Amino acid sequence: MKLSTTKGTAIFVYDLNDLLVISFTSAKEAAKHFGSNHLTIFKYALSEKLLKVNGFCH
């Protein structure tokens, strides 16, 4: 899945077909959901690269 940001730090998670899967109000909320660090989530969201979390590509 691909992460992206708009309007501050809101995080939107898209599948590989660019369909919205889930959204979060912050990188910290997304990190808690994925069991990751909020700085990692934010970094990947800004870069719009694929993020691999817990063995899955996000």
Image: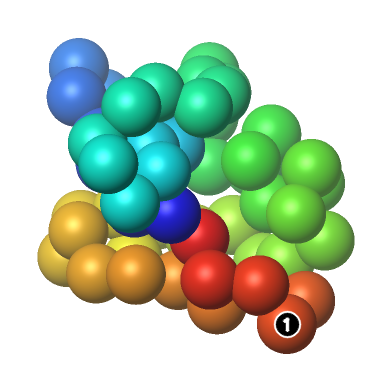
Question: In percent of the image, x 50 and y 60: which residue is there?
Answer: 58
Q: Looking at the picture, does residue 33 appear above or below residue 1? A: above
Quadrant of res 12 = top left
Q: Looking at the picture, does residue 16 appear above or below residue 50? A: above
Give the residue furthest to the bottom: 55
**Total marks drawn?**
1
Question: In percent of the image, x 17 and y 65: which residue is there?
Answer: 47
Q: Position of residue 28 (x, y in %)?
A: 64, 42
Quadrant of res 35 = bottom right
Question: In percent of the image, x 33 and y 51: which residue is there?
Answer: 16
Q: Position of residue 13 (x, y in %)?
A: 44, 37
Q: Looking at the picture, does residue 51 appear above or below residue 5? A: below
Between 34 and 2, the one lying in front of the other is: 2
Q: Is residue 57 left or right of residue 37?
A: left
Residue type indicated by callout 1: Gly
The residue that label 1 is drawn on is 55
Q: Residues within 10 Å of mark 1 (few under 14, many from 20)?
A: few
Q: Position of residue 14 (x, y in %)?
A: 38, 38
Q: Is residue 29 left or right of residue 42?
A: right
Quadrant of image for the N terminus: bottom left
Q: Is residue 43 visible?
A: no
